[in-house]
Image (spheres, helix red, strand yellow):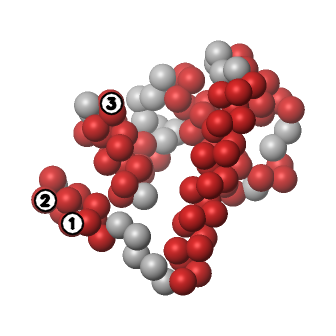
């Protein structure tokens, strides 16, 4: 999680936004498209079988193409896979990110 927060901080140039997203994306000051993507990622992560056509249509209404949606699903699924493998094996994949985060606070 630290690595994703760090990526958002760097890409957005907004450390406060990155921190808000990390703790509660629903309350963060994200653009509507970003919030829709975050909600979709949460749904795919927690209950992938619950994704409905309406969820995909919401992304389309926010300007995402079918290719964008496919890319999003692939990235979400990949990170879920990697995180589950790391958790199951007890791997701490990002100690350097945690250390960097300590120095920023």
The residue identified by callout 1 is: 99
**Closest to the observer, 12 or 79:** 79
Left of 86 or right of it: where is 14? left
How far separated are the C-alphas under marks 3 and 1? 21 Å
Counting the numbered discs, the total is: 3
The residue identified by callout 2 is: 103
- Kind of element beneath mark 3: helix
The residue identified by callout 3 is: 12
User: Where on the picture, by quarter, is residue 97?
Assistant: bottom left
Left of 67 or right of it: where is 28? left
Where residue 64 appears, as percent x and y from the top left, is 66, 21
Query: Dot 3 surroundings within 10 Å: few (below 14), some, or many (20 or more)?
Result: few
How far separated are the C-alphas under marks 1 and 2? 7 Å
- Kind of element beneath mark 2: helix
Left of 67 or right of it: where is 53? right
Instruction: Please report contact status of discs 1 and 2: CB closer than 8 Å, yes or no.
Output: yes
Q: Residue furthest bottom?
A: 89
- Kind of element beneath mark 1: helix
Disc on the earlier residue, 3 or 2: 3
Left of 63 or right of it: where is 56? right
Q: Is residue 58 above or below residue 27?
A: above
Disc on the earlier residue, 3 or 1: 3
């Amino acid at each position: 999680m630290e690595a994703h927060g760090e990526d958002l901080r760097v890409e957005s140039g907004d450390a406060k936004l990155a921190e808000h997203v990390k703790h509660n994306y629903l309350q963060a000051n994200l653009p509507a498209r970003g919030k829709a993507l975050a909600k979709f990622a949460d749904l795919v992560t927690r209950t992938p079988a619950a994704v409905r056509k309406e969820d995909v249509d919401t992304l389309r209404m926010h300007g995402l193409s079918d290719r964008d949606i496919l890319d999003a699903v692939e990235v979400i699924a990949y990170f879920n896979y990697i995180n589950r493998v790391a958790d199951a094996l007890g791997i701490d994949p990002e100690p350097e990110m945690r250390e960097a985060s300590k120095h920023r606070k």
